[in-house]
Image (cartoon, rainbow, N blue to C red):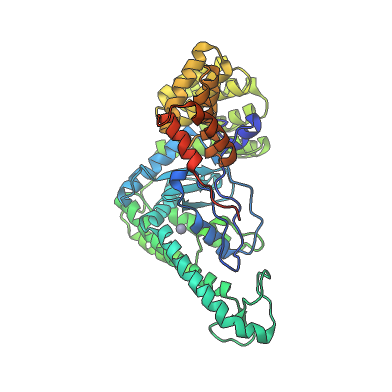
Amino acid sequence: MRASYQGRRRRETGAPFRPLFRPIGRFANDLSFAEPIPMSRRRSTSALATAVVAALAVAPKPAAADPTIIRDAEIEQLLRDYTAPIFRAAGISSRGAQVILVGDRSFNAFVADGQKIFVNVGALLETKTPNEMIGVLAHECGHIAGGHLVRMRQELANAQILSIAGMLASAGAVAAQAVTSRGGARPGGVGMDQAGMAGVLTGPQELVRRSLLSYQRAQESAADSAGVKFLTATHQSAKGMLKVLQHFANDSLFISSSIDPYLITHPLPTERISNLEQIAKASPYFDVKDSPELQMRHDLMRAKLLGFVGDPAEVLRRYPMSDSSLPARYARAISDYRFGKLDQALAEIDGLIASKPGDPYFYELKGQALLEGGRAEASLPLLRKASAMAPKGAPIRVLLGHALVSAGGKANDAEAVRVLARTTQDDPDSAEGFQYLAMAYNREGDIPRSQLASAQAFFISGKYVEARTQAKRAQDQFKQGSPGWLKADDILNYRPPEPD
Ligand SMILES: [Zn+2]
């Protein structure tokens, strides 16, 4: 993982990283939820449904800070390999659909922002086999294929009507009983529940909540069935999917105060598990196992993640010195370089490269360790090699661009412009890519392009005011109607969503 573990990179360089969602609002009386910040203007479809789901199931919970997005070429490639057959079976275009890694150690996976599957680091750390993770992804593909996000919005519109009807119906009851609403924010929201049980008061929000929750449960079962269908069509077992859900169903018995986010996005009534078990076991592929090669990639991925997000003690508990496997050495090397033992880490990475010279990500790690250890010039050959070996690894090329800018000099600056201009074209969500591109253009004295790249970096990070300032400066220098002028114009014309 590049320092593109963005939480780290942010501290290191002050680089912006893009916010995904602002904290989710509580289930307010008027059903207004915090609108998510779109990741780009082309993708203003939102995580509204996720916000609804999360808001539905829990009482107000202190929302975490904006989740960080983690970019890592190795993990992104593995997730592409996990999802490609499923996408094909589900008829989902892999152009629009994508898996995005969220830097949160709790277990969660959900679909939002159109066809994007968000997977928490916690889910990757906790799934022991590729098949378990693939099962989680297949279920999410079931949501995409079923158009559940779109339908959730329609349900929400219905729910709003229901809510208004509920408020009207309850107005009399409130006058009589002088009870304030659940949320306390405004009076008039409490009525008798439909069963008419004496003494049981249910606000319209509660009616709405139940309506949406029952709808959500139907969607979950539909996504399970679709997921199993995709797995069967691709000759894979649904055993892993079943195992993950069983794990959550069992654990939920012991949960009292804290609620796991996966349970919020994925309610688990017992019949759901038994239905899933039935259809999963009916598949002729139920006992199919992951290949040892794929299991190794999965193990390396988990080791890398723990190396990057865990503290040294946790890494050593999970991967003690007695463990000489490739994943264990990988995790320890990462942990060592992160916690200041650079020389030791470099020796360990050399050992990894000697064990598996065809793995681009070991060269990438060595390059990253050198770059962050202040040896940018020495990191260049390693990062060039890694990017040549992993042609789809945009995060590696961003790291190479960073290293070139850090090393400096005319030739390096020119190479940085070449590498980063192409990479940001292929991967237009990389705020970091644009940020280093801006620096490289600046070195070359190309001020308008530098300002435009800055504007794009700010824009992706959700910093619209700064983005507009830079875009305006850039536009003033471009010829009207030229490609640069138009890109700046797009940013200037964008209207961010109103904060609540
Ligand atoms: Zn689901």
**Residue 151, percent across and down?**
41, 62
Q: Residue furthest top?
A: 410
x then y, percent, for residue 261 = 57, 56
What residue is shown at x 50% (from left), y 51% (from top)?
Answer: 109
Residue 42 seen by the camera: yes
x, y percent for residue 270: 48, 68
Residue at the spot 55% in from the left edge and 37% down from the top edge: 468
Q: Is residue 372 above or below residue 73?
A: above
Q: Is residue 255 above or below residue 485?
A: below
- Count every numbered label the image shows and give the total: 0
Which image quarter: residue 205? bottom right
Q: Quadrant of the C terminus?
A: bottom right
**Which quarter of the picture shows residue 192?**
bottom right
Image quarter for residue 262?
Answer: bottom right
Do we see residue 365 in this rendering? no
Q: Position of residue 197 (x, y in %)?
A: 59, 86
Q: Is residue 338 above or below residue 124?
A: above
Residue closer to the observer: 245 or 369: 369
Q: Nearer the viewer, residue 11 or 288?
A: 11
Task: Judge from the rendering whether residue 7 lies leftward or rightward of residue 478; answer left or right.
Answer: right
